[in-house]
Image (cartoon, rainbow, N blue to C red):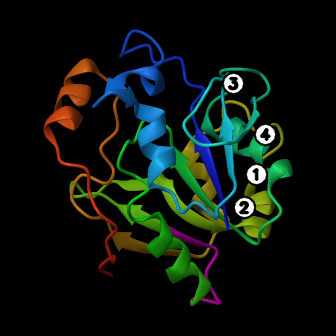
Amino acid sequence: MTAIVLCGGAGRRFGGDKTRADLAGSPVLDHVLDGLPSAWPVVCVGDPRPTARPVAWCREDPPGGGPVAAIAAALPHVDSPVVVVLGGDMPYAASPAPDLASRLAVGPGLDVVLGRDGDGRLQPLLAAYRTEALCAALPKPAAGTPLMRLLDSLRTLVVALPEGAALDVDTTADLDRARRRPRPTRHRLDP
């Protein structure tokens, strides 16, 4: 199992790099990384920086090319048959990650187990993918491709996420919501 964490976005609505914003005394990115199982290697896509956990760094080409380009940049650093892809601005996304990966492991006909938040939105940056299928689904060039296009050719299982797991910090109001929320524990996912 490997985790890819995307943390290279411009953060225009936030006014800067939202993954560096302080949440309970540590950067939002560290909340994501700290919640992942310690045995999982992590590849972060973005500008390298110190983190509380050792990670490998890479950058999408071109920088700012979007999440599909970021995933394409990280995949050459992945040796595992399954990869969990998370947004670095989603401080509580690591909580359901092990269950997403477990669901994929027991679903031999699946390419991805994808989370759906409480508002019904699919979360391709909170999902477990078969590495080989994800590589095959990547368009060339990857830059500028809408993230949801990756799912077009993949056999998908959608599962409900625990409340707050998909909270992403896109604005300062989102960061305030994250600050008011207790840190989640690991959850089993409902179908």
8 sits to left or right of 180:
right
Count of numbered badges drawn on the protein:
4
Q: In the figure, residue 163 lies in which quadrant?
A: bottom left
Q: Secondary structure at mark 3?
A: loop
Distance in Å between CA atoms under marks 4 and 1:
11 Å
How many residues crowd mark 3 within 10 Å: few (<14), some (14–19), many (20+)? some
Q: Amino acid at mark 3?
A: Pro
Label 4 sits on residue: 73
Q: Which mark is residue 138?
A: 1
Q: Amino acid at mark 2?
A: Leu
Label 2 sits on residue: 134
Distance in Å between CA atoms under marks 1 and 2:
6 Å
Label 3 sits on residue: 48
Residue 40, relative to residue 171: is it above or below?
Answer: below
User: Sequence order check: which comes first, mark 4 or mark 2?
Assistant: 4
Q: Which mark is residue 20?
A: none
Residue lying at 64% horizontally and 23% vertically, measured from the top left? 49
Residue 79 in the magenta stretch? The answer is no
Tell me whether the residue at label 1 lies in contact with that at label 2, contact meaning CB atoms closer than 8 angstroms.
yes
Q: Give the mark toward the camera: 1 or 3.
A: 3
Distance in Å between CA atoms under marks 3 and 2:
24 Å
The residue stretch that appears in magenta: 107-113
Q: Is residue 170 visible?
A: no
Residue 85, relative to residue 90: is it above or below?
Answer: below
How many residues crowd mark 1 within 10 Å: few (<14), some (14–19), many (20+)? some
Residue 140 location, x and y as percent? 83, 42
